[in-house]
Image (tube, rainbow, N blue to C red):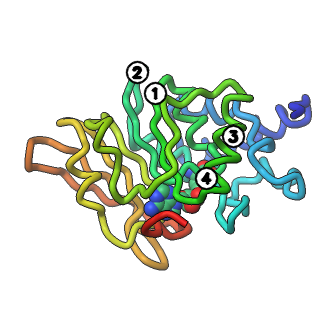
C-alpha cells in the first residue's frame, strides 16, 4: 500500500482535469487530490488510476470515473456531519470522498465479494463509514432514515420509492436514471410530498440490480 510522489503528482494532474471539466467545489477537488485512487484498483490497472476514466474492479463492476464522482458529490452538497446514504459501495472510492467531506456515511453493496473486500480495505486507509451494509439498495436503509443526501452510483431503470421517502425535508437524492444511458437526476425534497426535479447530462453506469447475489 504505497503512495509515492509520482502518485501524488499524477493526482494533482487529475484534479486539474476534473476542474477543467467544470467541477468548482474546492472541498471536492481537495478530496480527489488526497485519496490514493490507485489503491482502490487491481494492480494490473495501476497505470490508469489517475486517468479520468472508469475501470473494472472485482465482480464485473467498475470504479466510477473521477469526474462523475466529483459531479455527483457536488450535486449532493455535503456538509460536515451530513448523514449520507450511498447505494453501490463498489471499490469504496466514492465512500472515501464522502468521508473526506466529513459526512456520516452509510453505504450498501449487493455483491458479497466486493462488500467483503471494501469493508476490510477502507478502514486500512483510515476511512470509517458509519455502516457498510451487504444488501439491496433498492430498499434504502429504513432503520437509519431520514438522510440529508442519498447517492446512487449505479444506473437505475427507475427511481426506487423508498429512496425518496427516506430523505429529510431539504434532502437531496442524486441518481442516474435510465437503462443503457442514464440521465443524472437530482431530486430535492421540499415538503412531505413535494420534490423538485433537476436533470443534468447523460452518463453511463453499470446497472442497479435487484436483490443480493
Ligand atoms: N461507488 C462505486 C461505484 C461502483 S459501480 C465506486 O466508486 O467504486 C456500482 C456498484 O453498485 C457495484 O459495485 C454494484 O455491485 C452495486 N450495485 C448494483 N445494484 C445494487 C443494489 N441494488 N444495491 C446495492 N448495490 C448495488
Q: Tag 1's secondary structure?
A: loop
Decide if residue 196 is on the left or right side of residue 184.
Answer: left
Q: Which mark is residue 103?
A: 1
Labels 4 & 1 near each other (Cβ < 8 A)? no
Q: Nearer the viewer, residue 4 or 199?
A: 4
Pinpoint residue 152: horizontal percent, then vertical percent: 43, 54
Question: Of callouts 4 and 3, which one flags the residue occurring earlier in the amino acid sequence?
Answer: 3
Point 72% across, 43% down: residue: 14
Q: Is mark 4 within 8 Å of ligand 1?
A: yes
Labels 4, 1: front one:
4
Labels 4, 2: front one:
4
93 shown above or below 33: below
Labels 2 & 3 near each other (Cβ < 8 A)? no
Q: CA distance from mark 3 to mark 1?
A: 24 Å
Residue where numbered disc 4 is placed: 90
Q: Is residue 135 visible?
A: yes
Point 63% across, 28% down: residue: 127
Name the quadrant containing residue 124. top right
Labels 4, 3: front one:
4
Point 30% across, 38% down: residue: 143
Residue where numbered disc 3 is placed: 16
Decide if residue 82 is on the left or right side of residue 15.
Answer: left
Q: Nearer the viewer, residue 78 or 96?
A: 96
Question: Of callouts 4 and 1, which one flags the residue occurring earlier in the amino acid sequence?
Answer: 4
Q: Tag 3's secondary structure?
A: helix
Q: Is residue 154 visible?
A: no
Question: Of callouts 2 and 3, which one flags the residue occurring earlier in the amino acid sequence?
Answer: 3
Q: Residues within 10 Å of mark 3 (few under 14, many from 20)?
A: some
Question: Of callouts 3 and 1, which one flags the residue occurring earlier in the amino acid sequence?
Answer: 3
Residue where numbered disc 2 is placed: 81
Point 56% across, 39% down: residue: 95
Amino acid at each position: 500500500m504505497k503512495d509515492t510522489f509520482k502518485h501524488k503528482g499524477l493526482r494533482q494532474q487529475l484534479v486539474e482535469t476534473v476542474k477543467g471539466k467544470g467541477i468548482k467545489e474546492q472541498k471536492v477537488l481537495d478530496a480527489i487530490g488526497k485519496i490514493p485512487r490507485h489503491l482502490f484498483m487491481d494492480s494490473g490497472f495501476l497505470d490508469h488510476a489517475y486517468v479520468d476514466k472508469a475501470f473494472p474492479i472485482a465482480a464485473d463492476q467498475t470504479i466510477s470515473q473521477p469526474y462523475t464522482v466529483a459531479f455527483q458529490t457536488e450535486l449532493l452538497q455535503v456538509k460536515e456531519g451530513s448523514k449520507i446514504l450511498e447505494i453501490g459501495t463498489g471499490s469504496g472510492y466514492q465512500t472515501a470522498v464522502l468521508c473526506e467531506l466529513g459526512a456520516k456515511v452509510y453505504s450498501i453493496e449487493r455483491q458479497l465479494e466486493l462488500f467483503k473486500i471494501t469493508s476490510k480495505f477502507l478502514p486500512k486507509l483510515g476511512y470509517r463509514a458509519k455502516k457498510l451494509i451487504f444488501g439491496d439498495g433498492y430498499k434504502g436503509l429504513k432503520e437509519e432514515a431520514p438522510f440529508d443526501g442519498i447517492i446512487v452510483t449505479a444506473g437505475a431503470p427507475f427511481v426506487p420509492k423508498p429512496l425518496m421517502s427516506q430523505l429529510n425535508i431539504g434532502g437531496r437524492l442524486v441518481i442516474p436514471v435510465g437503462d443503457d444511458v442514464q440521465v443524472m437526476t437530482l431530486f430535492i425534497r421540499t415538503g412531505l410530498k413535494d420534490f423538485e426535479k433537476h436533470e443534468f447530462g447523460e452518463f453511463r453506469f453499470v446497472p442497479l440490480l435487484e436483490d443480493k447475489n
